[in-house]
Amino acid sequence: MTEAAIDIVKSQWFASLELQLGYSPYGTQLTKTKRCGPLTIQKAFYPEGRDCAHLYLLHPPAGIVSGDELQVKIDVQKNAHTLVTTPGANRFYRARTDLSIGDPKQTQITQINLSDNAKCEHFPLETIVYNLANGVNNVEVRLQNSSVYCGWDMTCLGLPSSNDFFTEGRFTQLNNLYRDGILIYHDKVLIEPVSNIQHHAAGLAGNTVFGTFLAYAPSEHVNSEQRTLLIEQLREVVSQHDASELISITNIRQLLVIRYLGQQAHQCKSLFIELWKLVRPLYIEKQGIQPRIWFT
């Protein structure tokens, strides 16, 4: 390997974390943990009892720079239940401009696999995309027809409160959800200021924060009448918060797709939490009690 090649390798930081959760008479337990680089968890917590393991993903650098690639794989075995979140916001920092020292791309890939009757709640805190970033954030969920999944992503472009707007750079958010190996949801957002998608009426329409909350449960668990009633209740909550222009709710093949488009990450998170409190008792059969780490 040449000296230049060695320098490029040094400029890249790969981190991966593989987690497997199983179910036994003792409840849901971490049965496998494999990690590489600065990505880990402390341990499983059980604030709701042994049947649901809470996991907090830890990335000590607290941000992704050029050349970084983070990979998270979560395998939830039959009957197991986990809630996965993060202690703070994720950040895609400004990308390098000197291409001679390596690829400027910044990548995070999350893969979640659910077996029969498994439940997963995936609630990372917001992702902040700094001006001049070159980021890719992919979330792929593969579940069985009998699985239950709830998860969201929230993206903030730039730091408007500091007058540091996302005027240059590139960011891609990709969400795929498969049921029994068949793709039932595909959503890709490519933000490039040169395309004017940030300001176009059919794009972000001048907004800096967008989020998607997905919730899936099998028809045997939540029938069509229950789902229809739930959607009515969700829309009522949205209306009560005067957020009808910010939130949309769609039912796509048993998958609830809740979208936020606005200006405030805190508002997006607060609204998603209020909606989750309605979804969770029906889908997860547990009350929507916020993890304590969200208050720190």
Image (cartoon, rainbow, N blue to C red):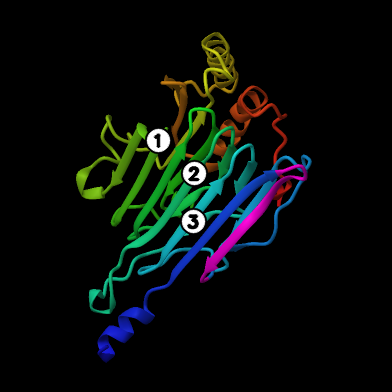
Residues drawn in magenta: 24-37
Residue at (54, 32) in percent of width and height: 147
With 274 as the anchor, is 262 left or right in this view? left
Task: Judge whether residue 295 can be spotted in this image.
Answer: yes
Above or below 269: residue 20: below
Q: Report helix, strand or loop for mark 2.
A: strand
Residue at (73, 40) in percent of width and height: 51
Amino acid type for the residue under numbered disc 2: Asn
Q: Residues within 10 Å of mark 3 (few under 14, many from 20)?
A: some
Q: Which residue is mark 1?
A: 178
Amino acid type for the residue under numbered disc 1: Tyr
Task: Tell me, yes or no, whether the highlighted magenta stretch contains residue 258.
Answer: no
Locate residue 217, reporting x and y percent. Answer: 54, 25
- 234, 195: nearer the viewer: 234
**Between disc 3 and disc 1, whose residue precedes?**
3
Residue at (62, 49) in percent of width and height: 21
Q: Which residue is mark 3?
A: 72
**Between disc 2 and disc 3, whose residue precedes?**
3
**Between disc 1 and disc 2, whose residue precedes?**
2
Amino acid type for the residue under numbered disc 3: Val
With 150 as the anchor, is 81 left or right in this view? right
Above or below 206: residue 109: below
Residue at (32, 70) in percent of width and height: 96
Q: Report helix, strand or loop for mark 1.
A: strand
Q: Residues within 10 Å of mark 1 (few under 14, many from 20)?
A: some
Q: Quadrant of residue 100?
A: bottom left
Q: Which residue is mark 2?
A: 113
Query: Between tags 2 and 3, which lies in front?
Result: 2
Query: Given contact means CB atoms under 8 Å apart, are the residues at marks 3 and 1 in contact?
Result: no
Task: Tell me, yes or no, whether the highlighted magenta stretch contains residue 35.
Answer: yes
Mark pair 3, 1: CA separation: 17 Å
